Image (tube, rainbow, N blue to C red):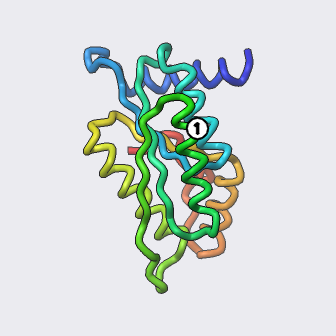
Amino acid sequence: MGLEDKFLKHFLSLLKGFNADSSLGPLTLLTAVSGGLDSTVLFQLIHKFRFELKCSQILLHVDHGLRMNSAGDAFHVQREASKLSIPCFFTSLSVKPEAENLEAWARTNRYGVLEGIRSRLDANWVLTAHHKDDQAETLLDRLLSGRLLTDLNCIEEVSP
């Protein structure tokens, strides 16, 4: 079984667990796309298997304004979404307050925007992509900040 087939099988099992009431009809998935490889692959796989998953997809790119090439990321997301005729929204965050942890500020604001757009568009789920390096970064951040580690699985596969 190839990686794409494994993805489809695993994602379908997640859908069955959260959409036991099939009378809800087709799902609308809001996918956060940074322009990086992980989120690009995620939205392309969702698009490829949209009929099997019985879903439609909307993309959202959040520009945190933290990198010099952030406009290039937005352009990449727009180009890829256009190729597949996937609706795509773009938003920018205001400048980060000096006293806050940069990663925490970006994450909190990104998820706030995602939830606001999800609610406004009546999407069923928000999807984000993470890779193993993200797990390692989260673990190191927790260790270095002295926060208690209650679980070595730093990024939940499914969260409320």
Q: Is residue 129 above or below residue 141?
A: above
Residue 42, picture quadrant: top right
At which x and y percent is residue 124?
33, 34
For label 1, the crowd category at 10 Å Cα-Cα, with few meaning under 14, some 14 to 19 and many 20 or more, is some
The image shows residue 29, relative to residue 50, as above or below, that is: below
For image coordinates 61% across by 56% down, the residue present is 72
Q: How many marks?
A: 1
Please tell me which residue lies in front, 144 or 81. Answer: 81
Residue found 67% across the figure and 61% down from its top: 137
Q: Residue at x 48, y 85 (%)?
A: 98
Eyeballing the image, is 51 above or below 131?
A: above
The residue that disc 1 covers is 80
Q: Residue furthest right?
A: 2
Q: At label 1, which amino acid type do we have? A: Glu
Q: Residue at x 36, y 30 (%)?
A: 28
Residue 24: give x, y in percent of width and height. Answer: 27, 20
The quarter of the rendered structure image containing the C terminus is: top left
Q: Can you give x and y, in whole percent of width and height, for residue 3 in the image?
A: 71, 24
Quadrant for the N terminus in the image: top right
Nearer to the camera, 60 or 81: 81
Q: Quadrant of residue 69?
A: bottom right
- Relative placement, left or right, of 113 versus 140 is left
User: Residue 95 lies in what quarter of the image?
Assistant: bottom left
Q: Secondary structure at mark 1?
A: helix
Seen as rendered, the residue at the extreme bottom is 99
Instruction: Indicate the position of residue 96 as horizontal and vertical percent values.
Output: 46, 76
Q: Which is more toward the observer, 149 or 116?
A: 116
